[in-house]
Image (spheres, helix red, strand yellow):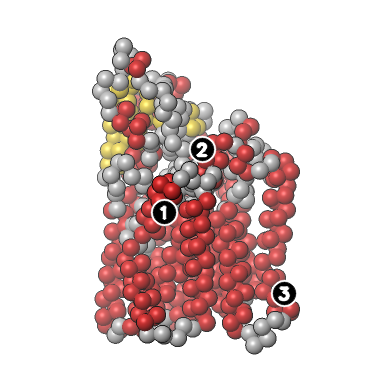
Amino acid sequence: MKLLNKSNISLLIVIIVYSLFTLMCLNHGYFWDNIQQISKEAHWFYLTDFSSLLMPAPNSGSEIVATGYHPPLMGIMTAALWKIFGYELWVSHVFIFLWFAILIYNLIKIINRFFDKNYAGWILPIVLLESTLLTQFAIASPDFILFTAFIISLRAILERKKVLLAFGIFFLCMINMRGVFVGAILFVCHSYYIHLQSSNKKSVNQIFKTILPYLPTAIILISYFTYYFCQNGWFFSNSSTNGHYSMPNGLERIIKHLAEFTLRSIENGRIIIWAIGFVVGFFTWKRRSVISTENKFLLSVFILLSALYLLFVVITQMPFSARYFMPQFFILTILSMYGLTQMIKTRNVKLLFLLVICFELTGSLWIYPDKIAKSWDCTLAHLPFYELRKDCFDYVDQQHINYNEISSGFCLYGNRKFVELNNADKIVGDEPDRKYFIYSNISNIEDGLAENLKNENLWLQIKEFRKGFVFISIYEKKLNENSSKQPQSFRVSKIKNR
């Protein structure tokens, strides 16, 4: 491969970075939505010896419940790996490193297709050192597998590899529901791509050949969802999850949702790619430049994916995360960088590539004020949390604080075994009406509760753990006449697995 021969330094740098993060995070517990989608679901299959495909429904009262709308492949794979290699945290991190190897091979293939040897070595770190993608790798997230499957599928479409496409589509759609949406859009855009290339526009044989690689996954998905509906009913019948997927309650909520969508799209250093993309797009339109068939295909995928999430802005209240936009951001990156190479001389464009890399590396420094929720699973700034979490619970155990008297926010409440794979049945509540409350900025708790904890008449901070941008504080409720006036309506916000 040309990239390996001419730009092995950038390849080596990327491999070293990802290898170091693997070693650094090898024994980190499950984080953010991974607690549900990987650990809890894997525990179900692991403890039941794969006796049932379906987990208990959300309203069952069970400690382990299904999200339902996410196919259970990630839990099944993790449980199988635990059975083979042991019930250990490092299993997930080594597994995700294998997907990194698959990703980098297929990514090189795509880069070499769009860029010559003078530029290819720059594009690889621009794509792989982006904060959101690197953080998804560090936490061993299913979305890293989703992104890898997306890259495999793109390569397969461009190179007309039907078996490879069937492989990519299977993992893309079976990892989570967002992958299903991406897979459906890829099918539409693939059909458009074939239409652009084919002289026989209405060939039935051509249509069948396009559908065939998608068919096995479509059959599996239809079978799974049919079985799920027959057993558990509609996904969102549970009121606690239904709020995210209900219609916005007015224009003001839609505007705020649109602002959130915009922020998550450009945060963590991504804004520089968007800026370059707008400039490239403007000059391409102004000059009426001819767009190649392959670039038309990529552009169609980008437009439909972006339109899908804009639709979600209007019809749901679903919280957005920067990781949701990894597929379309990759396409934006490729199209923007390709456009630069067509507009600017070699020496100058390489300086811009270097600027882009430096700007992306600042992505983990994007820390907002307390009242603006942060996608902590998309920034390396969260990494001190694991050490602080351990210090916090070590203190709780040393002080013999009763777990029945503790509540906390997201990533700290629940059974510790699902995060650490040990300390079973040390369970922290999620209602802030107990004697102790563990507060961390990682949890993104409601503003009212955060302000309430700072009221010295109601709560006493007995211990704080702080490192970098992350802190964890333990508060004890003051038992005096004022405590009876404390509002009891606050509930810890739960960032649902999406």
The residue wearing badge 1 is 258
The residue wearing badge 2 is 418
Give the crowd class for mark 3: few <14, some 14-19, many >=20 residues within 10 Å.
few
- At 42% from the left edge and 73% from the top edge, which residue is drawn? 334
Residue most extreme to the bottom: 199
Q: Could you tell me how far apart the alpha carbons at marks 1 and 2 are, in whole angstroms?
A: 34 Å
Q: Nearer the viewer, residue 221 or 16?
A: 221
Secondary structure category for the residue under label 3: helix
Q: Is 467 displayed left or right of 281 in the figure?
A: left
Q: Could you tell me how far apart the alpha carbons at marks 2 and 3 are, in whole angstroms?
A: 45 Å
Residue 329 point in image, percent of width and height: 43, 65
- The amino acid type, in three-letter code, at marker 2 is Phe
Instruction: Decide which of tag 3 and tag 1 comes sooner along the chain.
Output: 3
Residue 210 point in image, percent of width and height: 67, 74
Q: Is residue 116 above or below residue 143?
A: below
Residue 19 shows up from this direction: no
- The amino acid type, in three-letter code, at marker 3 is Phe
The residue wearing badge 3 is 208
- At 57% from the left edge and 53% from the top edge, which residue is drawn? 176
Q: Quadrant of the rendered structure where residue 274 is?
A: bottom left
Instruction: Decide which of tag 2 and tag 3 comes sooner along the chain.
Output: 3
Q: Which mark is drawn over residue 182?
A: none
